Image (cartoon, rainbow, N blue to C red):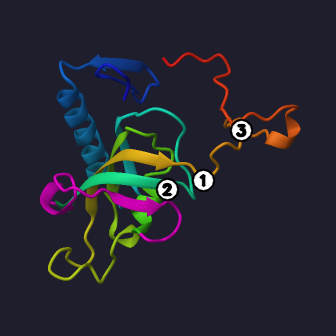
Amino acid sequence: VQPNNYSTFYDDQRQNWSIMFESEKAAVDFSKQVCIAKCNSSPALDSVLCQDLLLGEGQGVEGGDSLEVAYTGWLFQNNGLGQVFDSNVNKDKLLRLKLGSGKVIKGWEEGMLGMKKGGRRFLIIPPAWAYGAQGVAARVPPDSTLVFEVELRRVKLAKEGSGSDGLGVSSRDSPAPSPVPSSDGFSSD
């Protein structure tokens, strides 16, 4: 997924392709279908499938960060989206969670890593990473594969102001650690 309704991908010969869509909705719908196709073509889903729909901006989230999320969850049925079993999209309250605290299903903990504020992501989560053999009474049947569209509305980084610039250099190695992450001259595009 790229800004301005573009998507890029490599084919099996490592040839790079770009597609421009007429609208954000068309680009998002295409990205969802790519993720569903990946799921349907894998012999056994044994990890979380993630597909970015919108990239967002800022630093990618990691364990310990506090997030506020809008989401919709579907059952994965008949090789596609089945019925919605949970959503907070049209509600007043966002879901608040601390990544890595174990308060949400394992598939969310894994699938949201690296997301950026304002980003949207499509997750397909196998039963072992969701509610497993027990399911959720009257909502999620046992051994259900789940699909979520998650939107990261707010982020509070656990290491706010640590000067972490993602380059693996700890702040004590730099002469003057700054609380503001430097842009290192990279342009936003």
Q: Does 135 appear above or below 26?
A: below
Labels 3 and 1 touching (C-beta < 8 A): no
Question: Please, what secondary structure does the residue beneath circle 3 have?
Answer: loop
One can see residue 152 in this view: yes
Q: Quadrant of the N terminus?
A: top left
**Earlier residue among tags 3 and 2:** 2
Vertical comparison of 62 with 178: above or below: below
For label 3, the residue is: 163
* Image disc number at residue 66: 2
Residues rendered magenta in the picture: 77-103
Q: Amino acid at mark 1?
A: Ala
Q: Measuring 38% from the left and 47% from the top, which residue is drawn there?
A: 50
Mark 1 / mark 2, whichever is N-terminal: 2
Depth check, front residue: 57 or 12: 57
Residue at image mark 1: 158
Task: Name the kind of residue labelled 3 in the image.
Answer: Gly
Q: Amino acid at mark 2?
A: Ser
